[in-house]
Amino acid sequence: MVFTGDSTMTTEHEWGAEFGLTGGIWRHDGNLKRPNVRTTSQKISNGCFNGDRILADGHLFGLACKALWRIASSHGITGENLRIVGAAMGGISLSSRIAEAGMCRSAYAEKSGDKLVFNRFILSPHEKFLLAEDTITTGGTLVKLREAVAVACSANPTFAGAILALCNRSGKSELDGVPIFSLVSLSFDEWEEGSNPFTEDGKELVPPISEPKLNWHEVTRDYS
């Protein structure tokens, strides 16, 4: 879908409406043939935010990144000695575009086993780091990202007093005392395998879809 809004968007409702036009916000429609999705924490959910759909709309994504930088700036965060960091894959473009808006540096960490590492960048302990993520689900990735920064700096790094996200679906307003600022906050139901609150026996009527972003067609296709 083509972006229809403009840079005057300031509310979650306005951003949510535009994100919805891209098809990036999905909620189960109650169709018993339609599967739910499995989250990165291996829980099952009846909703999903797909940041890749936002990224694909270059104009909308650019405005979203500029809006996130304006939020950071309004809380006293400046580009001097600042580096925006994200985690592959979703945080690569996000950190880069926010850094572009703030005229500062960026970097991204990659998976290595159950950790994140900065293989392609040299981070300095003299920098200040601002964490960015496209979708915050549990906050686990942000914890790993923060740990990766510390390892890469070989020191106790300085972090900016904010965390930026396109979407916050964690239900948390902060992470270890650091406020989370997002353009939209979404709430979906989540449950453990065998505890589906919408079926009598707690079991899934059809197998849930793992890695929904990679299988978006299966999530959104017609199940009539």
Image (cartoon, helix red, strand yellow):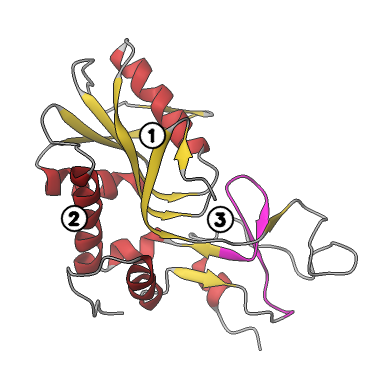
Counting from the top left corner in percent of width and height, residue 57 is at: 26, 69
**Magenta-colored span:** 32-47
The residue to which callout 3 is attached is 211
The residue drawn where x is 76% and y is 69% is 206
Q: CA distance from mark 2 to mark 3?
A: 29 Å
Q: Amino acid at mark 2?
A: Lys
Instruction: From this view, report whether residue 159 is shown above or below residue 105.
Output: above
Tag 3 or tag 2, which sits nearer the N-term?
2
Counting from the top left corner in percent of width and height, residue 53 is at: 37, 66
The residue drawn where x is 22% and y is 21% is 122
Q: CA distance from mark 3 to mark 1?
A: 18 Å
Q: Residue furthest front?
A: 75
Q: Residues within 10 Å of mark 3 (few under 14, many from 20)?
A: some
Q: Amino acid at mark 1?
A: Glu
Q: Amino acid at mark 3?
A: Glu
Q: Secondary structure at mark 2?
A: helix
Counting from the top left corner in percent of width and height, residue 24 is at: 42, 68
Q: The N terminus appears in which quarter of the rendering?
A: bottom left
The residue to which callout 1 is attached is 110
Tag 1 or tag 3, which sits nearer the N-term?
1
**Does 45 appear in magenta?**
yes
Q: CA distance from mark 1 to mark 2?
A: 24 Å
Instruction: From this view, report whether residue 22 is shown above or below residue 43.
Output: below
Q: Image quarter for residue 9?
A: bottom left
Q: Looking at the picture, tell me which residue is in the foreground, 145 or 72.
A: 72
Q: Image quarter for residue 86?
A: top left
The residue to which callout 2 is attached is 66
